[in-house]
Amino acid sequence: MHDKWELHYVDLFCGPGICRVRDTGEEIDGSPLIAAKLKTPFHQLHLCDLDEVAVHALKTRLERIAQPRPPQVFVGDANTQVNDALMAIPRHGTLTMAFLDPYGCR
């Protein structure tokens, strides 16, 4: 599909890109870094989080990973930022994966 479509990745609750395993303290890649490191990359990542410190940390981590296009990263409420993220994705010739995993969802 990579050769036929532009592939886009949307994560509206991206966090800092690193997760800490509660029981062991081990740090592992979170969803945005997993997406950024795929062997066959997405054409562009579209990321958002409410926490400005987390977004800054994620941007720093993403700078070390080559991407076809610079990631689009927003600070803000996903409910309002989703429109800006979607506007950057072409309406035709694309497949988009949205990962919506809000921390503390009840």
Image (tube, rainbow, N blue to C red):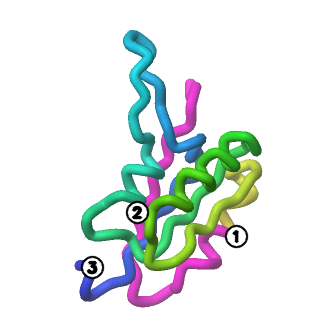
The span from disc 1 to disc 2 (Cα, nearest Å) is 16 Å
In magenta stretch: residue 93:
yes
Up-down relation of residue 80 to residue 49 (above or below): below
Secondary structure at badge 2 equals: strand
Residue drawn at point x = 68 percent, y = 51 percent: 78
Q: Is residue 52 left or right of residue 13?
A: right
Residue 97 on image: x %, y %: 40, 62
Secondary structure at badge 1 equals: helix
The residue mark sitting in front, 1 or 3, is 3
The span from disc 2 to disc 3 (Cα, nearest Å) is 13 Å
Secondary structure at badge 3 equals: loop
Q: Is residue 73 left or right of residue 28?
A: right
Residue 20 on image: x %, y %: 47, 25
Find disc 3 in the rendering and name its residue.
2
Three-letter amino acid code of the residue under disc 3:
His
- Which quadrant of the figure has residue 65? bottom left
Give whichever of discs 1 and 3 has the lower sequence position: 3
Q: Residues within 10 Å of mark 2 (few under 14, many from 20)?
A: few
Kindly give the residue lying farthest to the top in the view shown: 23
> The magenta stretch spans which residues?
85-106
Find disc 1 in the rendering and name its residue.
84
Residue 36 on image: x %, y %: 42, 59
Q: Residues within 10 Å of mark 1 (few under 14, many from 20)?
A: few
Three-letter amino acid code of the residue under disc 1:
Asp
Up-down relation of residue 19 to residue 67 (above or below): above
Please state the total of marks drawn on the protein image: 3
Q: Residues within 10 Å of mark 3 (few under 14, many from 20)?
A: few
Residue drawn at point x = 59 percent, y = 49 percent: 58
The span from disc 1 to disc 3 (Cα, nearest Å) is 24 Å
